[in-house]
Image (spheres, grey):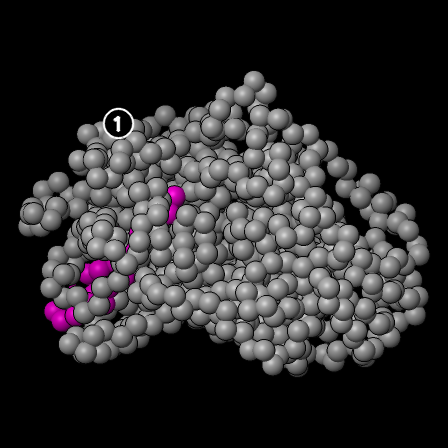
């Protein structure tokens, strides 16, 4: 389930008023930035930019200010008085998708060489975070944005694609979702903030492009029938999670958990209510870096006070204090398993290792009254969200564009390494970025994009204090060994029906997992580059995309989404002693989107997407030849659990199959360029925001707080975009959004 509530952690030891004083007392004379952009005390429209990228110098001519973008709710940069503007500029300088069938070598750079090599902001990666950032910068701030994506489709983990069945099966075309298939809080309800993704769509004027289809719950299946006896469902348990006040409590919670579970759930909801304060901060008010508090101080002061009173551990910490004490302890076994299942769908980790704010929001939003609790699916599939954001990037007259098949080889810097100057593509084409660079690549890929520039590496690898026990960080050019959420137990071929891996239910006590140093180094003591490299990777994915003949199927008796627990909610001790909802390929999501939107498939057919998200270990796929018979056999064998989940809903699914696509962790790794095909960073390793020691280089994506999920990366993308704009212009943008929303609900 893709849900999240925003809460900002900028408070550690910094008093907000001192931040404002530092702004006012900043140097009053303009400086020459590291790219040679000479600021003058007159107007910005007569500035010459002499840019150095590597050994290439590009002289740009003076140009007048760009005209207002001609789209609804579009805001051109209206400058403040020269004194205010100079003060702001001096204090704050301007600062990839899976395709299970296209398993070949077509993902490569194919950029058009005739296009401009000069942009205001270059964005690496067209995932949802990068697209949100680009759409905001283009539409609201009048920036020329170039987004450069390796894949031939935008959207990253959330893209959709079309496939034709074989001519033998009719040669029909189907729309298939590759990413998340269940969303919460996108339908706008009177008097409440919508999902952060929807807030971004509203801000850029593309909210009408996505038509949300609400529905009220999903089906649960435990212990589906086995392949050798599909008719025997004596052990199968079926129930429904229905949204709304008391529906869950008076239904499955009472049935399976009992009175103690009901009481603890009620107490847990109550005690986590303070964590919902961050939900009152609009997505568009977020920004990264030292100026992050300014919009909150001036526009959302009371909420900011609440967050400060809670402290960063509550606002950005894990749910462990609410599961295992000291704040609250959940003792009922069934409720603990249920909370772990919810958490795993959010983060790929158990509840004790999932963000507390995300859990609190989910526990609250699922049970809202007056019809305000609903799940949402976008008409046309998840790809319609991506299409709307791409339009947001490319609308207007700024000449912004999403460039596909354009793999970024490296980030370019000024000679002293203290300012991002642009990017270089794999084709050799160079793109100069006047204002800055946003990196939407996975955090583990960050080192590879900068390792060619020693001075930039030194800036990003600067350490506060670093224990010598972490050998990998003694050389800033050498990436450390991988850290993963899974502990390998058996070789797959030797497992004999037993688990090959188990998830780390608790964070290792030592930060260095390979040894037990006498003096462990905590993340806060590491440089940004170290934190990116050492971020713990959650598990990978296994996908099964199907197109089925729907003749004779009664869709009215089917749910739009199912969660199938292959070994039951509590797991199977004979498979693994500590098995549970987070066990290896136990939780399988089954999306049946044609229940909501029949147009995703031709008449008489449906599409189904079954997948294990974050619970497929990468290790025994590692190094396999994708063209080998061994690889193909392993895909078929590992996909049996996915087929079992589908057959628990459509028993004769194999006989009905018109199209079958299996995506492995290697597929996920290759097309998304995600190291080891990971679901994302562990909660404890989310970067607190996207700011870097290089002021005009910002990170976004699911490795940045608030982490994994479409709403979360929308927050991250908005924060990255706003951080490249001086805070006064950001505030002016929020004011204009207020004016454009007069007579409507205001979310800014």
Q: Residue at x 67, y 52 (%)?
A: 453
- Position of 703 with respect to 259 (left or right) is right
Tell me the residue that label 1 is attached to: 577
The crowding category of the residue bearing disc 1, from other C-alpha atoms within 10 Å (few below 14, some 14 to 19, many at least 20), is few
- Position of 663 with respect to 184 (left or right) is left
Task: Report the front residue among 154 and 418.
Answer: 418
Q: In the rendered image of this protein, does residue 518 appear above or below residue 268?
A: above
Which corner quadrant of the image does residue 98 belong to? bottom left
The magenta stretch spans which residues?
A: 539-563
Q: Residue at x 25, y 55 (%)?
A: 628
Q: Residue at x 54, y 55 (%)?
A: 441
Specify the quadrant that holds the C terminus: bottom right
Q: Position of residue 572 (x, y in %)?
A: 22, 33
Q: Position of residue 286 (x, y in %)?
A: 65, 53
Task: Report the front residue among 509 and 714.
Answer: 509
Residue that lies at the very extreme toward the top in this rendered image: 518
- Position of 68 with respect to 609 (left or right) is right
């Amino acid at each position: 389930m893709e849900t999240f509530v925003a809460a900002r952690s900028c408070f550690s030891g910094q008093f907000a008023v001192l931040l404002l004083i530092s702004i006012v007392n900043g140097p009053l004379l303009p400086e020459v930035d590291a790219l040679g952009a000479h600021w003058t005390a007159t107007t910005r429209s007569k500035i010459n930019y002499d840019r150095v990228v590597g050994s290439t110098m590009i002289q740009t001519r003076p140009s007048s200010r760009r005209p207002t973008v001609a789209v609804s709710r579009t805001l051109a940069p209206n400058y403040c008085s020269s004194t205010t503007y100079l003060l702001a500029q001096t204090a704050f300088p301007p600062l990839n998708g899976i395709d299970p069938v296209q398993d070949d070598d077509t993902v490569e750079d194919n950029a058009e060489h005739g296009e401009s090599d000069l942009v205001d902001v270059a964005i690496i990666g067209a995932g949802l975070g990068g697209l949100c950032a680009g759409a905001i910068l283009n539409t609201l701030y009048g920036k020329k944005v170039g987004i450069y994506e390796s894949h031939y489709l935008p959207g990253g983990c959330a893209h959709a694609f079309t496939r034709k069945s074989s001519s033998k099966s009719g040669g029909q075309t189907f729309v298939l979702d590759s990413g998340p298939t269940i969303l919460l809080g996108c339908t706008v309800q009177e008097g409440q903030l919508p999902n952060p993704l929807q807030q971004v769509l509203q801000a850029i004027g593309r909210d009408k492009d996505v038509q949300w289809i609400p529905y009220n719950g999903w089906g649960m299946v435990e212990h589906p029938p086995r392949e050798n006896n599909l008719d025997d469902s004596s052990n199968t348990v079926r129930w429904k999670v229905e949204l709304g006040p008391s529906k869950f409590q008076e239904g499955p919670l009472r049935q399976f958990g009992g009175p103690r579970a009901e009481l603890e759930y009620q107490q847990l909801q109550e005690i986590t209510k303070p964590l919902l304060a961050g939900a009152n901060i609009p997505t568009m008010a977020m920004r990264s870096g030292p100026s992050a508090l300014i919009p909150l101080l001036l526009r959302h002061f009371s909420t900011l006070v609440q967050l400060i009173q809670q402290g960063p551990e509550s606002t950005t910490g894990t749910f462990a204090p609410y599961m295992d004490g000291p704040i609250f302890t959940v003792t009922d076994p069934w409720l603990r398993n249920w909370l772990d299942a919810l958490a795993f769908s959010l983060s790929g980790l158990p509840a004790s290792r999932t963000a507390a704010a995300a859990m609190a929001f989910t526990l609250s939003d699922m049970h809202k009254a007056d019809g305000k609790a609903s799940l949402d699916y976008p008409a046309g599939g998840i790809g319609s969200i991506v299409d709307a954001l791409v339009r947001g990037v490319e609308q207007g007259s700024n000449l912004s564009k999403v460039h596909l098949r354009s793999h970024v080889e490296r980030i370019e810097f000024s000679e002293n390494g203290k300012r991002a100057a642009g990017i270089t593509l794999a084709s050799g084409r160079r793109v100069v970025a006047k204002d800055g660079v946003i990196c939407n690549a996975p955090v583990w890929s960050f080192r590879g994009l900068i390792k060619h520039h020693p001075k930039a590496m030194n800036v990003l690898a600067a350490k506060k204090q670093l224990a010598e026990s972490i050998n990998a960080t003694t050389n800033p050019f050498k990436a450390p060994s991988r850290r993963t959420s899974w502990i390998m137990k058996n070789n797959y071929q030797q497992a004999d029906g037993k688990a090959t891996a188990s998830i780390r239910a608790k964070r290792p006590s030592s930060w260095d997992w390979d040894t037990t140093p006498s003096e462990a180094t905590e993340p806060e003591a590491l440089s940004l580059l170290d934190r990116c490299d050492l971020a713990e990777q959650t598990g990978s994915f296994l996908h099964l995309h199907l197109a089925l003949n729907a003749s004779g199927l009664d869709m009215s008796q089917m749910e739009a989404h199912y969660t199938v627990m292959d070994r039951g909610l509590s797991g199977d001790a004979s498979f693994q002693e500590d098995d549970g909802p987070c066990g290896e390929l136990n939780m399988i999501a089954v999306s049946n989107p044609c229940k909501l939107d029949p147009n995703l498939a031709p008449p008489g057919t449906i599409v189904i997407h079954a997948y294990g998200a974050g619970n497929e270990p990468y290790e025994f796929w590692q190094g396999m030849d994708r063209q080998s018979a061994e690889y193909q056999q392993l895909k078929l064998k590992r996909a049996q659990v996915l087929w079992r989940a589908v057959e628990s809903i459509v028993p004769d699914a194999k006989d009905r199959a018109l199209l079958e696509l299996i995506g492995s962790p290697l597929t996920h790794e290759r097309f998304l360029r995600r190291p080891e095909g990971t679901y994302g960073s562990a909660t404890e390793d989310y970067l607190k925001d996207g700011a870097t020691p290089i002021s005009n280089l910002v990170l976004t994506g699911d490795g940045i707080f608030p982490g994994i999920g479409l709403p979360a990366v929308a927050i991250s993308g908005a924060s990255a975009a706003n951080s490249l704009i001086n805070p006064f212009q950001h505030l002016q943008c929020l004011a204009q959004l207020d004016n454009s929303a007069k007579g409507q609900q205001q979310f800014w």
